[in-house]
Image: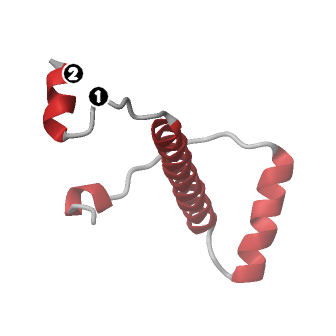
Amino acid sequence: MHTLHELEKQQVGLRLNTYLVNELDEMTKTFSVNRSDIIVEAIKAYISEHKALMLYQGFESACQELQQVVKQKQPDNLSTLSDLINELD
């Protein structure tokens, strides 16, 4: 959820290649929306996709780390939690 302050609009300038502006203008006519709406939705989709990608990469890394831990043999002398604590000290 966003605060009211975060939902306020702020003007941002950007420069685009002419062919992108032309395609953008075609979409505004096709879908009866303005440029800003299309750009805002594109940015939201881009951010959402990359956040999900970072989450999945982190999850994959954690799974690989867990697999390595599970594959390692537990030493015979560490059969209880107390043994493990003593080993770590």
Of marks 2 and 1, which one's residue comes earlier in the chain?
1
Label 2 to label 1, Cα distance in Å?
A: 9 Å
Q: Residue furthest top?
A: 89
**Residue designated by label 2:** 87
Dots 2, 1 in contact, CB < 8 A: yes
Q: Amino acid at mark 2?
A: Glu
Which residue is disc 1 drawn over? 77
Quarter residue 9 falls in: bottom left
Q: Quadrant of residue 22?
A: bottom right
For disc 2, the neighbor class at 10 Å (few under 14, some 14 to 19, many from 20) is few
Residue 12 at x, y = what percent? 49, 45
Task: Pinpoint residue 29: horizontal percent, then vertical percent.
Answer: 76, 77
Q: Is residue 56 above or below residue 45?
A: above
What is the residue that sits farthest to the right in this orientation?
19
Q: Residue at x 49, y 50 (%)?
A: 55
Element type at mark 1: loop
